[in-house]
Image (cartoon, rainbow, N blue to C red):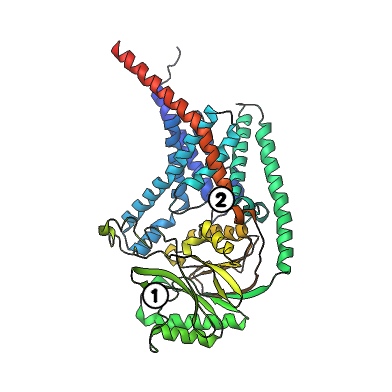
Amino acid sequence: MKKIRDPLQGEHLRTLSVFLLCSLTACLYGMASPKLNWHPLCWILLVPFLLALEGAGMRRGFTIGWLCGTMIHLVCFPWIVGTIQRYSNLNLTLSILAWILFSLYSGLAFGGMSVAHLLVTRRSLLPAFLALPICYTAMEFLFPFIFPWHLGACLYPVLPLIQISDLFGVFGVTGLLVTANAAFFEIFRFLMKRQPFPFASAALSTLLVAASLSYGYWRMDWIHAQQEKSSTLTVGIVQANVLIEEKRTPLLQEDIWRRYRELSLEAIRQNAQMIVWPESAVQFPFRPQSGPHSASAYLKEMIRSFGTPVLFGSWAIEVDGPRNTAYLLDTRGEVAGRYDKVHLLAFGEFMPFSDSIPQLKGLVQGVGDFRAGERAEPLCWNGSCFGVLICYEAVLKSLPRKLINLGGQFLVNITNDVWFGDTNCPEQHLMLASFRAVENRVWLVRAANTGISAFVDPTGRILNRTALFRQAVRVSRIQTLGVPTLYKSWGDWFPVSCSLLLVLLLAPGLLAEAREQMIRKRARREAHKT
């Protein structure tokens, strides 16, 4: 007797397989990212997701993408729970809820990307292995992520392959990886005897990787040759490792100042010509014009005694509210420049929509009410100009590019990552920031309160990095390059092109899908009448 297959059971198995495949992709993302940094997994991590998406309709495709994107963010951003607890003093339950909501929101990007990929591959002549990198790159560029990150950034240890960032930005590395993932997916389908061998996608991926490697090795040699001809500046980084509890304890303030003094003097002994302290190194509003017995006057006198300029993070009080500010004090202890943070972190430095809905202010303990700076210009001292990036701004791409185009010869990123604890976040932060050096072909000096502090050279090589939660001094000689790059001139032309091409590809598919929906609705109405 022939056994009748239960369709409900088949649907349950299908749902389970989708869940397991999405879970596998999320785990591969996690292993390819900091702290594990198993970057070879970047080339195949989308294969399980593409298997789950195979044969899905639009609604199911969106659900699969949303599920996969949510799981990826749950795996890659677990540090959000501890950060919210430390920063806002919320209990564990509410912190976990915020982590889940963050992941659900971020996962929407993958849901939209899945629908776009299905529409393009089914409604146009574009092969799937070309449609996927276009859709994925457009997603990374267009979606308003709370914490922007990029698949291509996971290749930051592989220097030859990330050199194309000075042409396409980090988006170019993402596109390269996604194209290879699409090729490996088709090769997997060939091995499962579902299709002939994908010569086109395999050949394209091999060609792109070979071209990227060739360009990378050539460009690195060329950059190193240019550095030998450039003027130099010796910069010292001070990592004082001031913990949250120490900052909140008045009796420990003298010990904190002692650390900064001793570590700065050690940097000077190593011939530092400029010293960088991290974000919020000065825990009070710095007032340059305050009286002789004030804390600000004490700070100015200390820096004057160094005889070396110091860049430090503090905050400034203005009529309309406080600013997250970096000050540059010269050898006389006088203000040589000031930068107010332009891009504030939502839910950290300000509560979104609180200007329109004042009741939101103070709703969550720890969320600040900072005001954004109005100008972004390089700071200069003794002929050397540099762009300052405070914390999260190093993750962004447009601001560093603007500062370099305005005359900055290198970038300085000051940050306070103590809130993230001993997690993968400080490494993620450094990973994303390192691409600003490659895109603009400048040095990046990164001073973090509790780590990771480091120097990043114009090829993306990370030098003199510190350990987390250790007091440290790092001194390095950097070159002030003036190398032109396509990315520096044209910015995000590559993801913009992908986004415009995606719109052109989607338009016929969306119209056809809407027409079919109308036909189906009309047919159902007529069937209902009869």
Q: Nearer the viewer, residue 340 or 466?
A: 340
Q: In this view, does 146 lie above or below 464?
A: above
Tell me, yes or no, if residue 26 can be seen here: yes
Residue highlighted by disc 2: 492
Q: Which amino acid does label 1 sit on?
A: Lys
The extreme left residue here reads: 359
Query: What secondary structure is marked by label 2?
Result: loop
Crowding near pointer 1: few (<14 within 10 Å), some, many (20+)? some
Query: What secondary structure is marked by label 1?
Result: helix
Give the quarter of the image for residue 178. top right
Q: Residue at x 63, y 31 (%)?
A: 191
Q: Nearer the viewer, mark 2 or mark 1?
A: 2
Q: Which residue is drawn at 55% across and 55% down?
A: 36
Q: In this view, does 392 lie above or below 202?
A: below
Q: Which of 526 and 364 is in front in this view?
A: 526
Quadrant containing the N terminus in the rendered view:
top left
Residue highlighted by disc 1: 247
Quadrant containing the C terminus in the rendered view:
top left
Tell me, yes or no, if residue 466 can be seen here: no
Give the quarter of the image for residue 350. bottom left
Where does the image place residue 157, in percent across and percent down from the top left?
Answer: 62, 56
Q: In this view, does 266 lie above or below 437?
A: below
Q: In this view, does 509 lie above or below 75?
A: above
Q: Which amino acid does label 2 sit on?
A: Asp
Where does the image place residue 167, in percent across and percent down from the top left?
Answer: 64, 51
Crowding near pointer 2: few (<14 within 10 Å), some, many (20+)? many
Q: Nearer the viewer, residue 176 or 324?
A: 324
